[in-house]
Amino acid sequence: MSSGDGGLGIRKATLRLGEHSLAFADFEFDVHFFRDLAHDATAMAISLGDLGRSVPLLARVHSSCVTSECLMGCDCDCAEQLEAALVTMARAGRGVVFYLMQEGRGAGLTAKARDRMIVQASGNRVTTFEAFASMGLPADLRSYDIVAPMSRMLGIRAPIKLLTNNPEKAAAVASALEAEKIEVFGIESIQGPTSRFNRDYLSAKHDLGHVLDRPSRRQGALPPTAVRVFEPAALHGDPQRVVTASYFLPIALPRGREEAVQTVPVDAGDVEWFRLSVVYDRATERETILLSLGGGEGGIESDPDRRSEPVTMRLFDRLPGSGSSGRAALRRSLWAIRERGSGGVLVRFDDRDHAEP
């Protein structure tokens, strides 16, 4: 490894790009940015305290979830797990979260959205893992190899206790860290609240062996209208953009539209079902998300005149804390759409923007 000024360094094909600070839960964390040059992907590490000490270290390896972390969806527990990990680290005074861009258990945004589309089209009778199988995908495609060079550049040598509910993930992380002779000596479960919106998802994870309290067997909440499975098609009136998947995302909006928190307890906010459509742009070769309410063919709001200004989510908008300008802008747009009763907003993602909010 070589290192330079400003937290720069390189290990194998992983480049360290520097760091910023993050205020959360009355603590100030350090956010370290990395680039996987072999796979053209960004990764982050959120740390607290001296990582170079030899005493055991709390760590979480967290996979990105834009629907909960950026869009404030409440049909999973991903954002809650991220927040819980940081709070647990803060109480211990030391720890690190490795944040990896592995949307949809490594299958990507479109596969994740098609998974939800298949589940909702079945009336929640099909699980997320069965939906993956129906698409010809394994249950989990994630890789944790990058955690080893990231750990080396952060100066980690101590044994690690993983904050996770997934024993298979713990074994995979332990295998990856063997390259840097870092031991994983155990796991600590972190659980978020269960609601009628994430109950079926958590039940599927429990049945697969995740260390979770068994959720109620009552059926979870169903979307307001039927969802159908379809093949990718051009967005109505915009042939340059292809809709690859569409389903309903329950979003918990806080009472005050200016609040900038990442997660809202379901019983403390108003939940609205927005249609989420993943749109692939032929020109930019990127996926974006269109959140819409009412109107449009198949419920997809395709009329640009009825859309709010596009919102861009940067790296910091994926993290908890009150400084997310992207989430604040999206929240204002969603409130306006809700008050009108229809409309849409296009959400873009810039995973190369390391600027502080």
Image (cartoon, grey):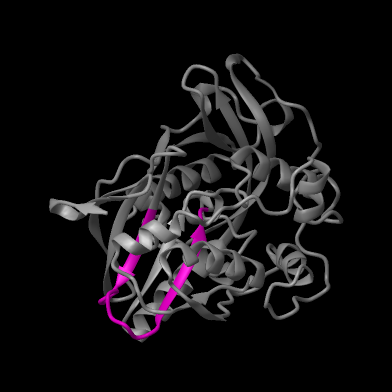
- Residue lying at 60% horizontally and 42% vertically, measured from the top left: 108
Q: Looking at the image, can residue 261 be seen? A: yes
Image-quadrant location for residue 78: bottom right
Q: Which residues are magenta?
A: 44-64
- Residue lying at 51% horizontally and 75% vertically, measured from the top left: 163
Q: Is residue 321 left or right of residue 78?
A: left
- Residue 282, compared with residue 112, is above or below; it is above
Task: Report the front residue among 247 and 88.
Answer: 88
Q: Is residue 303 left or right of residue 134?
A: left
Task: Report the front residue among 284 and 224.
Answer: 284
23 within the magenta span: no
- Residue 288, compared with residue 25, is above or below; it is above
Task: Report the front residue among 16 and 334.
Answer: 16
Image-quadrant location for residue 19: bottom left
Q: Looking at the image, can residue 321 be seen? A: no
Task: Give the percent coordinates (x, y) of residue 168.
Answer: 66, 68
Task: Give the percent coordinates (x, y) of residue 17.
Answer: 26, 48
53 within the magenta span: yes
| The N terminus - image quarter | bottom left
Q: Is residue 263 left or right of residue 199?
A: left
Task: Give the percent coordinates (x, y) of residue 33.
Answer: 31, 52
- Residue 240, compared with residue 54, is above or below; it is above
